[in-house]
């Protein structure tokens, strides 16, 4: 087994549940819920547009090559997402001001080329910054980063690397300790353990990580299917897509969907109990949890939403039965 895989498995086996006082868990859960509510309210029109499969895969593979824990890869994706959104907003703002003041517009092609030419450097800087937030685990040195960039044909100096990090930090007002879906998943698993969940938290944790990777890699297809299901239309309008942005930024909803799908994979007989606990903890409707878990399952293992023996909303149950019938023909 190669070193990155050994490191990743070691970090999984070291994770422990049930070691924190319930009062601390309650405070932490409340804090996460407040953060999530704020993020959903502040969701902008272009949020999520840079969580593309190729970009996410690059970050995941790089994090694995550098033996970073999973939380770092998710953090890096979120930092890069926020940074690129800021860059796009700044470019749009400059163009609007120039148009309003009838000034000579900057060369749009040159601006795009400048952004493109520095993209790999900015991406690597985001991974390095994320590693520094997890300093208890491993920090990626400048030498490691420069050697990696050189192997791809990008020659940079340490000064340019530091300037790149500073550019990311300034763009985000030094607010890079961003919440990730993993924090919500692990917090909810902790609460489920105290609530007497029939499926062990440690057993669910490994499956949750796999499914969370999948959701990041298939972000648009999964959320696209959710949007179509929510409006019951295969061709959403632009306005409907813009309004759906807040759902893409709802990490609490994503976390319950991930855990529900993991529970179904691990022990489908306990799915109803797990979903009931998640609804009680978060206040998210059972139908929403079932809808999200259905989307994740159909894009991962190709499984159906829990069958008629589980309390599933009628429209989901009918869809599951149709999918089962088609797969058997």
Image: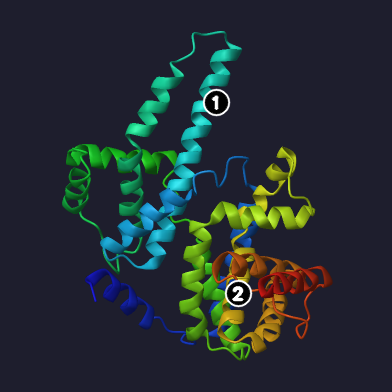
Q: Earlier in the sequence, mark 2 or mark 1?
A: 1
In the picture, the quarter occupied by the C terminus is: bottom right
Q: Which of 24 and 60 is in front in this view?
A: 60
Up the image or down, 66 lies above or below 310; here it is: above
Q: Quadrant of residue 252?
A: bottom right
Examine the rendering and report whether any part of residue 155 can be seen. Answer: yes
Q: Nearer the viewer, mark 2 or mark 1?
A: 2
Q: Residues within 10 Å of mark 1 (few under 14, many from 20)?
A: few
Number of numbered labels in the structure image? 2
The label number, if any, that marks residue 93 in the structure image: 1
| Secondary element at tag 1 | helix
The residue depicted at 63 percent of the width and 40 percent of the height is 45
| Secondary element at tag 2 | helix
| Location of residue 235 in the rendering, given as x and y in whole percent from the top left corner | 73, 45
Rounded to the nearest angstrom, the CA distance separating label 2 from label 1 is 41 Å
| Location of residue 28 in the rendering, given as x and y in whole percent from the top left corner | 55, 71
């Amino acid at each position: 087994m190669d070193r990155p895989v050994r490191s990743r498995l070691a970090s999984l086996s070291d994770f422990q549940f049930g070691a924190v006082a319930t009062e601390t868990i309650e405070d932490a859960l409340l804090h996460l819920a407040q953060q999530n509510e704020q993020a959903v309210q502040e969701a902008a029109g272009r949020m999520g547009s840079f969580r593309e499969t190729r970009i996410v895969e690059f970050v995941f593979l790089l994090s694995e090559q550098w033996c970073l824990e999973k939380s770092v890869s998710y953090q890096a994706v979120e930092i890069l997402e926020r940074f690129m959104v800021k860059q796009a907003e700044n470019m749009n703002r400059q163009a609007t001001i120039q148009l309003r003041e009838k000034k000579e517009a900057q060369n749009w092609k040159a601006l795009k080329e400048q952004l493109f030419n520095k993209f790999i450097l900015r991406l690597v800087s985001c991974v390095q910054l994320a590693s520094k937030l997890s300093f208890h685990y491993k920090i990626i040195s400048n030498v490691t980063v420069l050697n990696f960039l050189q192997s791809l044909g990008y020659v940079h100096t340490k000064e340019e690397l530091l300037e790149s990090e500073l550019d990311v930090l300034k763009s985000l007002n030094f607010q890079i300790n961003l919440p990730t879906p993993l924090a919500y998943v692990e917090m909810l698993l902790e609460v489920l353990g105290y609530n007497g969940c029939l499926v062990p938290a440690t057993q669910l944790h490994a499956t949750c990580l796999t499914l969370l990777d999948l959701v990041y890699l298939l972000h648009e297809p999964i959320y696209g299917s959710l949007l179509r299901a929510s409006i019951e239309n295969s061709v959403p309008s632009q306005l409907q897509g813009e309004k759906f942005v807040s759902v893409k930024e709802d990490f609490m909803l994503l976390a319950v969907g991930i855990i529900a799908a993991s529970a179904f994979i691990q022990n489908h007989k306990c799915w109803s109990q797990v979903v009931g606990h998640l609804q009680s903890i978060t206040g998210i409707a059972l139908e929403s949890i079932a809808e999200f878990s259905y989307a994740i399952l159909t894009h991962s293992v190709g499984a159906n939403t829990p069958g008629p023996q589980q309390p599933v909303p009628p429209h989901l149950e009918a869809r599951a039965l149709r999918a089962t019938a088609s797969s058997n023909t």
